[in-house]
Amino acid sequence: MHSQPFEDSAPREDLGDEPSGGGDVEPSDSPGDAAEGQAEEDVPAGPDVPAPSVDELRAAMDWAFSGEEVEASLLDIYAQHAHMLLDENRRVNLTAILDPKEVAAKHYLDSWRITQFLPLFGHTVVDVGTGGGFPAVPVAAAEPMARVTALDSTKKKVDFVQRSVDELGLKNVQVHWGRAEDFLQTERADFAIFRAVSSVRENVRTLRKVKQSVRDVVMLKGKSWSREVRAAEREAERLGFRLDTVWEHSLPGEMGEHVILVYQAPGSLGR
C-alpha cells in the first residue's frame, strides 16, 4: 500500500459492487421527487437468501483483516452490521455481494482503510450516497472521534442505516435523508466521501454549488480510476477541484487493486 502524488497508471480492478457501495446520488425516490409512500414502492428487494450467521461473518472478518492491526471488538461490530445488512438485503436491495469473505473485504476492509489513510480524528465526514452504510458505519466504528453523516436520498436505505446505527450504539453518526447539494448548503465537511457513486466527473459536478463547504473530496475507485481522472480533468479544474493524492491498496484473495483519490476542494483554501 502506498500513497503518491497523482500519476497516471494502468487501469485497476473494479470495486466490483459499485451500485451498492453507496446509493445513487439522484435516485427517483429522493426528498421532493415523490411522496414517501410512492417512493418506497420503487425500491427493489435483493436476493431472497438467508443471511450468513454472525459467527460465519466474524470468521470472514478475521480472514479479510489478517495482518492488519485492528481490535477484535471492531471486527465484532463489523460482523454484526454485515449480518443486519444481508438480512435486510432480502427486503431492500443494499448489496449484490453475498459471499461472506467478499463482504468482509470489499465492504468493510475497503471502508476501514480510509481511517488508516486520512486524519479523521476530530473531523467531520459526509458519506455521500451511503447505501447500506458504506463507508459511514465502518469508518465511524473505527474512529469514534470523527463526526460522520451518512447521507442518502433513498428513504428505505436511510431507514436501514438508522436502525443499524442505533442497534450498534454508534453515537458519532447522524443519518440524513436528502441530497448532498442540499445538506451542504447549510453544513460544512472536512471530508466528503464518495464510494462507488458515479464517475469522478459527476461527483465533482454534484458538489459544484457547495464546493466552498468541503475541504477534501475522497473517492474510492477501482480499475477505471485513471481513465475517470483524465475524463474529469477539465471539469475538475474549472470547478476548482485539484487531485492531490492517490493511495493504491490491494484486497486479499486476489479481489483486486483499489485506490483512494483525494481532491482538494475550494473549501480547503486558507486551511
Image (cartoon, rainbow, N blue to C red):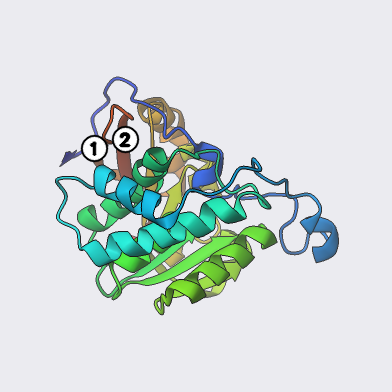
Q: Using the image, tell me which numbered label, if any, was put on residue 249.
A: 1
In the picture, the quarter occupied by the N terminus is top left
| Identity, as a three-letter code, of the amino acid under mark 1 | His
Q: Is residue 263 among the parts visible in the rendering?
A: no
The location of residue 49, given as percent across then percent down, is 61, 42
- Marks 2,1: beta carbons within 8 A: yes
Between 30 and 251, the residue placed more toward the observer is 251
Figure quadrant of residue 74: bottom left
Whole-angstrom CA distance, mark 2 to mark 1, is 5 Å
Q: Which quadrant: the C terminus? A: bottom left
Sequence order check, earlier mark of 2 and 1: 1
Residue 65 numbered mark, or none:
none
Image spot of residue 39 (x, y percent) = 79, 57
Q: Judge by depth and name the residue closer to the eye, 154 or 201.
A: 154
Who is closer to the viewer here, 164 or 243? 164
Q: Is residue 62 left or right of residue 211?
A: left
Q: Secondary structure at mark 1?
A: strand
Residue 151 sits in quarter: bottom right
The answer to which image quadrant residue 245 occupies is: top left
Residue at 73% x, 64% y is 31
In the rendered view, would you say 128 is above or below 174? above
- Is residue 78 shown to the viewer in this render? yes
Position of residue 133 relative to residue 145, above or below, is above
Q: Which residue is mark 2?
A: 258
Graded by Cα atoms within 10 Å as few (under 14), some (14 to 19) or many (20 or more), the crowding at tag 1 reads some
Identify the amino acid type marked 2: His
Q: Secondary structure at mark 2?
A: strand
